[in-house]
Image: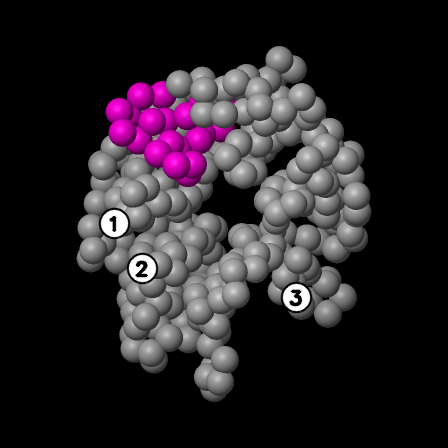
Amino acid sequence: FYGESIVYGTDAGLFVRTPGASADAPLSDAGPVHELVVVSDIAVAVAVLGKKRQTYVFSLASATAGLSSSGTLLTAPAMKKATLLAYGTYSTTPLLAVACSSAVFVFQWSGSGFVLTQSHTLPTTVTVLKFFKSFLVIGFGHAFEVIDLETSSISPLRASDDKLSPVAVCVVDAQLMLVFADEGVFVNVKGVTTQDFALKWTTLPTATCFIDPYILSFTRNFVEIRTKVTGRLVQTMQINDCAFHSVHRNAAGSRAAVVTSYDPTSDATSLLLL
């Protein structure tokens, strides 16, 4: 979401749908769109596009005003075929992280564009990226580690004893919930356990999010809802071909999970807020 507009990506490209407009405004026809983050604070969308998986930055202010926005290619030495994007802020400064296989690049917003501030190479492909305060949490191999953005140092958070891969990381209040294939565990930035319970999944989640006071985990056809206090499963919702995209905060401050559901019978995708 960008204000009342919806920014979305398909195999055909990147578009903006604005209420009252006669048609959706195209940002790019260089599909497919592999990754997308919308940064409302600075009115930009960052997307990984096309077969080369290049990263572009688009002006949403221009697009919603009916002006052309060709996008700016984001580059850095050895930055090829982006696989993940993450956005965060530190001391009110917008930050962007881009993973390209086992390499991670961190950019800072300069007022007119993103500028590379640091890069790291990990032992294996990075599968999870998440900003948390002055840290960037990364998941790769069978472990989570954390990059201190002030010192550029990397420290371990948690490794899986069963050699399971990291799935996601979710910020729950002032804690990190590290999601492995079998469970979700709560730690601080030093890797110290902060809760005396772990969340046990009935089905391997593809994503998680926190809508206070509930933790939502998403699978192909179900959403499991648990309380943050005890981790108890309180509800299961069936949503066919479900995909989690982001958490949206409206003008009143309420938060909702942005989810899509695909219906193969009608070949239509529905947008849901949970």
Task: Please give the name of the residue rendered at 35% of the width and 34% of the height, measured from the top-left corner.
Answer: 134
Give the residue number, with chain letter if any, for mark 3.
Answer: 270
Q: Is residue 230 left or right of residue 180?
A: right
Task: Please give the name of the residue rendered at 47% of the width and 71% of the height, measured from the top-left corner.
Answer: 5
- Residue 234, horizontal then vertical, whole percent: 79, 43
Secondary structure of the residue carrying numbered label 2:
helix
Q: Which quadrant of the view contains residue 98?
A: top left
Between the C-alphas of marks 3 and 2, the distance is: 28 Å
Instruction: Evaluate if marks 1 and 2 touch, with contact meaning CB atoms under 8 Å apart.
Output: yes
Give the residue number, with chain letter if any, for mark 2.
Answer: 42
Q: Bounds of the magenta span?
A: 131-154
Residue 173 in sight? yes
Q: Is residue 106 above or below residue 274?
A: above
Of labels 1 and 2, earlier in sequence is: 2
Give the residue number, with chain letter if any, for mark 1.
Answer: 109
Residue extending farthest top = 161
